[in-house]
Image (tube, rainbow, N blue to C red):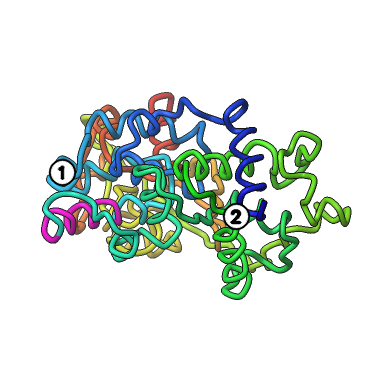
Amino acid sequence: MNLADTFSDRLLGWWDEHGRQDLPWQHPRTPYRVWISEIMLQQTQVGTVIPYFLRWMERFPDINELAQAPLDEVLAHWAGLGYYARARNLHRAALACMAEHGGTLPKAADDLAQLPGIGRSTANAIVSQSTGKPAAVLDGNVRRVLARHAMVGGWTGSAAVQKALWREAETRLPAERGADYTQAIMDLGALLCTRSDPDCAHCPVRSDCQARLAAQVAHYPAAKPKTKVRDRPVFMLVLQDRQQRVLLQKRPPAGIWGGLWSLPEAASLADLEQQSGLTLADCIYLPPREHRLSHQRLLIQPVRARKLQARQVKSLPEHCWVTLKQEASLAVPKPVADLLRELGSL
């Protein structure tokens, strides 16, 4: 038997007994449901995704409902999952499907990969899980499994390493049960072949795992090269009117928290004064907080202006006054949402 047969047979045998077979997007495995789950699962763990997926499907059960919904509502249903470009791309892709593909996802992986936010791995995952046809995938979990099993050195995000991993992924594909195999290899990485403390003793493919045989599992895959994380001070204005409504401003569509509703912000108190038209010399400084992003750490200093100054605010572009209850229905960045929830006890 060749590597594909032995690897996939052992993996599928393990998955039949120990794999995750009751995930909500598996029942049924439609292209749309698989697509939404795959995008949500990028950078996010299954346990976190499940309640978001269920709420999403209740509101946006198909591409037509997603395309017709305002982007604000789409972002509100995504709020808390982070990496908001994923939600914007889902909406853009749904609009493209309505305009160019008759309101359905394309069937071919190459066509799927042309849609916003869908790359080669995600396109193959949609095809394999919705049709059962074997197709190689290369998400973070799969990269780790293959880097260890084939002992592929280097950071898995580099082009050269990914090229090698694609070859290994395709070499191990079974002739059938594509949907189950895709889930199985992702489960192997999530449940056993974890980043730290992998459970090699129970791994179904341990007998020919090259990194295990060389006692080098901890060294594969190589760590991502460190990127310098810079600190960025952010002054956020907390302003309530006499009805206890909070002033929010819509962020630009691109960049951090693109398209979300947030508190007016600036890099300094002076800039915040100029932007808001308020004199903030005697404002109340609320407890500072930090929020870590992939490339920077936000050092957030909330400042609370006096209520009587609310009428002095300049006409900010795309702003609104909302109650704390109304805020819950908007797409608001997590650190801002946390701060607003604390306002009830201030």
Q: In terms of depth relative to the viewer, which is nearer, 90 or 110?
A: 110
Regarding residue 307, the answer to whether it shows in the image is no
Above or below — where is 167 with respect to 186?
below
Local SS, label 2: loop
What range of the chain is rendered magenta? 89-100
Foreground residue among 294 and 178:
178
Residue for point 24% across, 55% down: 106
Disc nearer the start of the sequence (1/2): 1
For disc 2, the marked residue is 172
Q: Classify 346 as above or below 77.
A: above
Quadrant in the rendering for residue 121: bottom left
Q: Report the residue at 60% width, 49% height from top.
A: 141
Q: Is residue 138 left or right of residue 343?
A: right
Question: What's under tag 1, amino acid-wise?
Answer: Ala
Amino acid type at image mark 2: Arg
Q: Are marks 1 and 2 in contact (CB under 8 Å)?
A: no
Let me know if residue 80 appears in the view: yes
Image quadrant occupied by the C terminus: top left
Mark 1, residues whose alpha carbon is within 10 Å: few (<14), some, or many (≥20)?
some
User: Per the image, is 118 magenta?
Assistant: no
Magenta-colored segment: predominant secondary structure: helix
x then y, percent, for residue 288 = 54, 45
In percent of width and height, residue 196 lies at 75, 45
Q: Residue furthest right?
A: 215
Question: CA–CA distance between discs 1 and 2?
Answer: 41 Å
Q: Residue furthest bottom?
A: 160
| Residue at the spot 63% in from the left edge and 70% down from the top edge | 161
Report the mark closest to the observer, 1 or 2.
Answer: 2
Q: Which residue is mark 1?
A: 69
> Residue 81, percent across and down?
43, 42
Q: Is residue 77 above or below residue 277?
A: above
